[in-house]
Amino acid sequence: VTELPRQGTFCDTTIKQPGAVLVLNAAEDPQWADKPYVKGPPCTRFYLGFPLRVKDGQPVGTLCALDAKPRGEVTDAQLEMMLDLARIAETELELRNTLQTQALLLDREKELSRKNDFIRRVLGRYVTDDVADHVLSSPEELHIGGERREVTILMSDLRGFTPMSDKLGPENVVRILNHYLHFMVEIALKWGGTIDEIIGDALLIIFGAPVAMEDHARRAACCAIEMQQAMDGLNRLLQSEDLVPIHCGIGLNTGEVVVGNIGSEKRMKYSVVGSPVNLTARIEAFTIGGQILASKETCDQLGNEARIDGKLRVNMKGYSKPVCIYEIGGHQALVKGCYSPANRKVTLTLTVNLHFAIADSPIIYRDGNGGKWWNVIRTLE
């Protein structure tokens, strides 16, 4: 195979032309007679070439026929055949380019998928998979702002953990919290909750955002029940490691809030704001260890599916009248529907002065580790 520089050759001329280039006898053609490849090897005499172009009109090569013998003529049929071959060659080149482009796109898609998986894994350590997917699938929504959405909010907190942590030492505190959060986070994700905050031993979980859910109240209630059911297994694990048992209280509330990206352009987070969040915190503050308390709004959505163990009227800061909250003891959606006996009792171990008389309740509402006695009235149902 002999290679020649393209400049000044038949093909160099052809690629610049709009149509075919035909040379019947190069030795007798003044344009070609003195060319080295005509005067010497390969002693070209006949040439017929067509330029090859891709869809955008860019010339990419030529299809040509050469011979060391001159020709007297070329028929129209021969020209048509060469033109057809040239179009076939252009189609093949276009197909090759398409396949190469597809292969390149597939490679880039795989690389993008690997990067997205990495980003999702990293984000997943700080936000839920739903929020990570929401960010990756809708990057145009990464702006400050939000929308109104009805959600159910779950707040949980370990009872008496702060004074306990002062005695345990930082290493043991971290071990307990890591075990506790491992159990609770898995349950929250199972029921589709979005973990908005983890502050020490406290959890704030949203049901109904960013992914809308018609049954957000049911999911939140079932999540809360499974969290309480998991505490027995968690405490057995803690005791096997010579750590102290722990108990959590959970508050639930349903209402319309604003959810979205809150913060600044440099630092933002997907979060929830509104008075229902504050009410959830106040409801959670009334719980003792192992208890779930919910607002009327949440219980209304649960209907007859939930087991309500009691109704409480409590005085809350910011509310001029007592607020009714309800103790949830189970839900029919769960195989193991109940997490505690209906008539759970807490023994009064010291004399206290209450602003309201507790005349009919076997439950004294007090922080499970010697904390504040709450101003509570329990009414008969």
Image: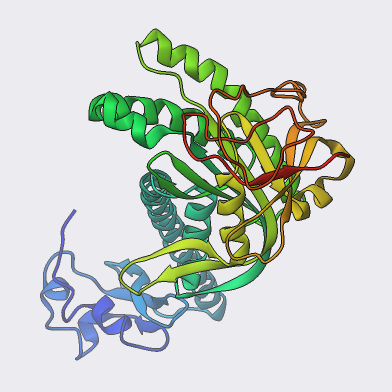
Q: Quadrant of the C terminus?
A: top right
Asked if 155 appears above or below 160 in the picture, the reply is: below
Q: Quadrant of residue 240?
A: top left
The picture places residue 183, in percent across and down from the top left corner, at 50, 28
Q: In the figure, is residue 202 to the left or right of 258?
A: left
The picture places residue 327, in percent across and down from the top left corner, at 73, 38
| Rendered image coloring scheme | rainbow
Closest to the observer, 235 or 8: 235
Residue at (55% x, 81% y) in the render: 76
Residue at (66% x, 37% y) in the render: 292
Residue at (51% x, 54% y) in the render: 131
Closest to the observer, 27 or 53: 53
**What is the total number of numbered labels drawn onto the structure image?**
0
Q: In the figure, is residue 51 to the left or right of 233?
A: left
- Residue 210 visible to an observer of this rendering: no
Closest to the observer, 381 or 292: 381
Q: Which residue occupies the extreme top position in the image?
A: 240
Closest to the observer, 284 or 346: 346
The picture places residue 53, in percent across and down from the top left corner, at 41, 77
The picture places residue 326, in percent across and down from the top left corner, at 75, 43
Asked if 158 appears above or below 4 in the picture, the reply is: above
- Residue 194 visible to an observer of this rendering: yes
